[in-house]
Image (spheres, rainbow, N blue to C red):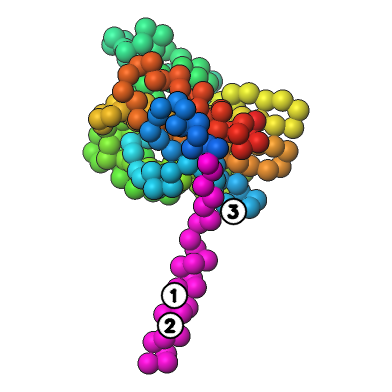
Amino acid sequence: MKKLFTGLLVLFASHALAAPIWQESPAVAQLFSAAKLRGTFVVYDVAADRYTGHDRARAETRFAPASTFKIPNSLIGLSTGAVKSVDEVLPYGGKPQWMKAWERDMDLREAIRISNVAIYQELARRVGLERMQASVRQLGYGNGEIGQVVDRFWLDGPLAISAMEQTGVLARLAQGQLPFPEEAQAAVRQITLLEQGPGWELHGKTGWADSSTPAIGWWVGWVKQDDKVYAFALNIDMSQLSDAPKRIELGKASLKTLGLL
């Protein structure tokens, strides 16, 4: 009985140590309330090993990553040699696209900036199903499942990831700690850079998963302040196209409220 009790204590202590530290932010919650949006925002402070944000339950809920997967897709494409560099031009395929701007061949540097789905589908096909599946699992990316359709799994599923899981992957990318060549990680950090100033950088990527109802809008990335990294992820319910700009607007407002921008 004593051994059983001791074992339970050890198990409980181990779980407590492994459980992530979460700090709810009333100020961020107020931003969501004022915007009349349902969603979550989370920041992972790498140095403190602490999460701060709004709606922990939703932050732990998995959704299709949509175009936020362009970040790992770029990394996997570069690491496997499916594309030589972020400047190699890929064909879009010649078919009509949702956006006219996507209807031309381009490199990853431009394709990630305008979120060109066709270019990244071509990249995924070049990687191939087997290498893509192995790489997604190697990343520890969400549920790690890509199914059998190599150029749609991040849009329609079965791949799914939570906001908290997004920050874990991004924090390691920001520090060059993913199990992929550092040269590839550095290239992806370069093409995800949105803004910078003396001693700080903002990296990010939006996503729009419209395969679910309501659609899910994403904005993920990280802020680097000198040698400190703060990875973040936002997702919101999106009922209409006019909600799209609110992803970055609310995300930036949340970062500013937390003193990170």
**Dot 3 surroundings within 10 Å: few (below 14), some, or many (20 or more)?**
few
The residue that disc 2 covers is: 7
In the rendered image, the vertical position of residue 245 relative to residue 219, given as above or below: above
Q: Secondary structure at mark 2?
A: helix
Looking at numbered disc 3 in the image, what kind of residue is underneath it? Asp
Image quadrant occupied by the N terminus: bottom left
Point out residue 28 in the picture as x, y percentages from the top left corner: 52, 36
Q: Which is nearer the eye, 43 or 137? A: 43
Q: Position of residue 9 (x, y in %)?
A: 46, 79
| Amino acid type of the residue tagged 1 in the rendering | Leu
Query: Which span of residues is magenta-colored?
Result: 1-26
The residue that mark 3 highlights is 49
Q: Residue at x 65, y 30 (%)?
A: 261
Q: Are marks 2 and 1 in contact (CB under 8 Å)?
A: yes
Q: Is residue 119 above or below residue 76?
A: above
Instruction: Tell me the element at label 1.
Output: helix
Question: Does the stretch in magenta take in 75?
Answer: no
Identify the mark nearer the N-term, 1 or 3: 1
